[in-house]
Amino acid sequence: MIDSRKPMTTQRLLALLNYAYLLLVMFVIAGILTAAMTLQYANGELPCPLCLLERIAMFGVCFGIMLNFRHGFSYQNTGFSLLFAIVLLVVAVRQSLLDIYPRPGHEYIGSAIFGIHMPVWSIIIALCLLTAYAIKLAILGGDEYLREAELAEFPAIRKIADILSLYVIALCLINLVSVVLQCGFGECHTFNYKLLQ
Amino acid sequence: MMVAVFATMSLALICGWFGRRSLAVALFVLCLALSVGLFLFEIYSPEYGFRMPWIQTEFVGAPHVRS
């Protein structure tokens, strides 16, 4: 049912903002994952198991967003994204606490970006995601018109979302192959690619 | 285990893309369960359990005040 309290142009604008927001979040996460993979393959910085779980959490956030684009907007999909945003936060906080006091075998892995290591960046990313979702819910609300708005009304956003979704799927598949090479079917280590020895 | 986590997430994304929503959600939930299990396995230490004694602080008592 369309919300009759708001004019149609306002409803359309809010729906457009909603989809643009989702697109922006997926674009940023895809950029972060691309940067992490570039560091891995260009600099030879192999990800640790908790780093890989942080990547999975980011793919999980993208999964919820992708369902919104493929199957229509739903707060259930938003819930999927928020679940993995919380997983990202928990894993990143634990990893930061694990490495916060340098000891043999426990120090921040990989190079620092702007002086901040990846686990700490992951905390920042998770907090930004949760904050962004909270702000979006506060501004756009849980109104019916977001669920009624068809993505077909915004062909440009739909096209970009399709391309971005396929890109995220490709990133996940590349990561899967990379994990098979790095870990085999056992535990993961950061020494080398187990199957390339 | 990590391979299973990435495989289920990849399949969930692919099923989501091709319109198999219920299958995608089932794989997503499986991936979440596997991720949580793997996370607990990774952070567990036979020596410390789930505790983190290296960040515990000691009680040093009240600072000495000159009279």
Image (cartoon, coloured by chain):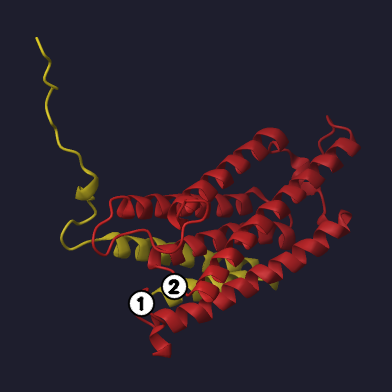
Residue nearest the viewer, comparing A185 with A143: A185
Q: Is residue B16 visible?
A: no
Q: Which residue is mark 1?
A: A191
- In the picture, residue A144 is in which quadrant? top right
* Residue B49 visible from this viewpoint: yes
Check the picture and name the quadrant holding the C terminus of chain B.
top left
Q: Is residue A66 above or below residue A15?
A: below
**Residue at x 39% of width, y 60% of height:** B36
Could you say which disc has been placed on residue A46 in the image?
Answer: 2
The colour one sees for chain B in the rendered image is yellow
Residue B19 at what x, y percent from top left? 70, 70
Q: Residue at x 72, y 65 (%)?
A: A164
Query: Who's the residue at 76% across and 66% down the image?
Result: A162
Disc 1 residue type (three-letter): Phe
Callout 2: SS: loop
What numbered label is drawn on residue A88?
none
Disc 2 residue type? Leu
Query: Do marks 2 and 1 share a subunit?
Result: yes
Chain for numbered disc 2: A
Residue A152: percent from left, percent from top = 86, 58
Mark 2 and mark 1 residues within 8 Å of each other at the beta carbon: yes
Q: Which SS class for mark 1?
A: loop
Q: Is residue A150 left or right of residue A124?
A: right
Farthest-out residue, front: B66
Q: Which chain is red?
A: A
